[in-house]
Amino acid sequence: MSQRLISKRYSYYGKTQGVGFRPTVWKIANNLNIKGRVFNNHECAVVEIWATSKIHIKFKNILHRSLPVTAKIDKLVEEFIEEKDIPKDFLIINSKFQGDAVNILPDLAICSECEYEIFDSMNKRYGYPLTNCTQCGPRFSIMKSTPYDRSRTSMDCFKMCHECKKDYENPSDRRFHAQPIACRNCGPNTILEDLDKHKKVIHSGSIWSQLKEIKKLFKENKIIAIQGIGGFHLACDATNYELIEKLRLCKNRYEKPFAIMGKNIEMIKSYCKVNKSEEKWLNSIESPIVLLEKRKKSELPSNIAPEQIRLGFMLPYSPLHKLLFHQVDFPLLMTSANLSEEPQCISENEIKERMIGIADYVFWHKRKIINRMDDSVVQINRNKLITYRRARGFAPTPIKLPPGFGDGQCGIGLGAEIKNTFCLLNKGDLTLSPHLGDLKEGMVDLEYRAQIKKFIELYKAEPDWISIDLHPDYRSTIYGRLIAKEKNIKLIPIQHHHAHLAACMIENQLPKKHPQVFGITLDGMGYGTDGTLWGGEFFIADYSNYKRYGCFKPMPLLGGNLAMREPWRNTVSSLLSSFNWDYLKSNYKNLELIEFIQNKPIDIIKNMFNMSIYTSSCGRIFDAVAAAIGICRDRISYEGQAAMQLEAIIDKQIFSPYPISIEHVPENCHFRYLNLKPMWEELLNDLYVNVSPSAISAKFHQGLSTAITKMIINKYSEIKNDSNISKIVALSGGVFQNQYLKDLTENELIKCGFIVLTQNFLPSNDGSISLGQAVIASTKYK
């Protein structure tokens, strides 16, 4: 007697579309002789099966163990169905347009099987530079709309040949419903074009002849714009110092480090130290740029990453890059095809308009890039991933809201001014946009606005609210006001550093109703609620509220925005906040630093000192110390440069840390300042006796960590009996990208019995401000 068939529907939410999930289900179902079907809708993958109770359990267990490498299940919803029309076997059917899109996959690096095929002369995809399958290739970068079907991508204009269509329709093939599927007979092919308008030479023909020509051009010191997955790179020989200098001048990128692409791990290891964790991430499907420690005798030119101890390396992540390095046997400098701070070029026409005079040739194809995507940048510290820029490979993978939030709201956090991202909260998912850049650059601002509109369309979102930074002049704030007015929805301003802290809490999945935590947010600057600019803050907070109980003693921001570009101004401000100028002249008159300051218009500076807005910024303190010891004293050419170089020279021996005192504020007995005066006294004395800059940097970092820990310990001793406050400390803000400071602080806090939360997969800089804004706003919306 046969057992009764049970009919059930399984809705799998997460990374289930475009990753080979349906073929996997089809194979398992056929092996188990199950009748049913699988299909995609806007929200998830749906499996409907008719089987015995025992087979249902077996199916779920096998599927859980057999998921494709790039698939991930966030949630499974099961329900009984009453449909009597039982399929005769198991089918993969077309997508159904139900629900709202909540999960769009990031672009993935070439898989090992596709790599094998492009070098197999017997394979039809031999040498094809745009091959892909369900485990690799472009996703978000080619999407026009959802659901993810070929007709809604930039491949819609390429009709599949008979063989590709056969693969596409075969559930047992790994290219089953791989939407960008193509080959050299039916897909886009590459063109190598000379950008010299007088020559107008176009190199077409076989990929192999093009690649030989490209190698020759690199040897002739040419710069070639090469189309990647999410945009174009400017590529050149990374061993050529003069060529790199030329590229720096042309791009207006005078000192900011460049990234390098190496042929393989062996090549990278010849220039940098690579541990197992770093090798794993270099070879990962995300394939980011990984910051690696230089070998002492690295033969690469110093102007790739001036005054830095690390180089940013990545491996070839597309079939085109793999084929390129089949010919090229030296590292290539790979920088985004743009002028400094502008958006990356994404078409050959943009290259011809914007890169004339910089690139000599362009190597491109006709698979259009719809959504611009920079390379992600990470570092591995103590075997943990540290994310500096979240883009290709990671974005727009959603982050789940922690327990207690629910999934009924929809809103957008619009982020900060620099390192901008925006974040869509929809149906319990936080979808952080790829890195966009500095909104002060007009082209970035336009891209930002276009991408927000695109996300609203892709995710079928209807925002209830918009959350913005408190700073009234941020372009994100201005645009937020415009959206709120146009859509007649609520506008929710969020304090910058509270947003930093909330992003850290979300990454660590603290529940909504978790007791308050201690928060340390150290960064450049953010708008405060007291008329000053904050940036060295100590909070007790949860998702909805915060109490600021301390900060670095505020100092004038001499020259306003100039102080962010000219570090010496911060040195002067910090010194004059601690000492009388006559005292400095009298006691340190022979000190080179004081002589440098005396050559400035000191009377004007003293007047500015009394009229400037004040800031508690920790970032400006790093600038001040760096300039005091001669690092980037006059000017920086990119954000964070002085602090990065100060970290790079640290002597990691244990010194007596510089003292930083904790003082009560007379008008508020519950508020504390960290006062730098004792630190400056010892630092000036060290300069006077020629203590090395490396030792001074170490003593500064160690003193900073010690003072931060004492601030937490002192506050905890006051409120330790308050059950509404946990013994958890969250560290956030761009200053905590300094791994030496973060490690010191984390170690000290753990020794004192605290649990420390840090950010790994989300950047601790302003790149995750928008996510914090969205989460906090969701607690305030009524």
Image (spheres, grey):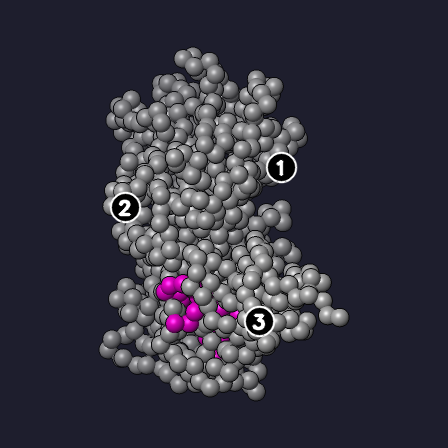
- Residue 729 position, x and y percent, is 56, 32
The amino acid marked with disc number 3 is Ile
Q: Which mark is residue 487?
A: 2
The amino acid marked with disc number 2 is Lys
Q: Earlier in the sequence, mark 3 or mark 1?
A: 3
Q: Which mark is residue 248?
A: none
- Tell me the CA gap for discs 3 and 1: 72 Å
Quadrant of res 517? top right
Q: Is residue 412 above or below residue 261?
A: above
Q: Residue furthest right?
A: 1
Viewer-side residue, 675 vs 781: 781
* Residue at left offset 55%, top offset 59%: 11
Residue named by callout 1:
653
Crowd band around label 2 with a 10 angstrom C-alpha radius: few (<14), some (14–19), many (20+): few
Q: Secondary structure at mark 1?
A: loop
Q: Which residues are magenta?
A: 128-151
Q: Is residue 273 above or below residue 531?
A: below
Q: Is residue 395 above or below residue 207?
A: above
Viewer-side residue, 31 vs 131: 31
The amino acid marked with disc number 1 is Gln
Q: Secondary structure at mark 2?
A: helix
Quadrant placement of the N terminus: bottom right
- Residue 374 position, x and y percent, is 42, 58
* Residue at left offset 38%, top offset 35%: 782
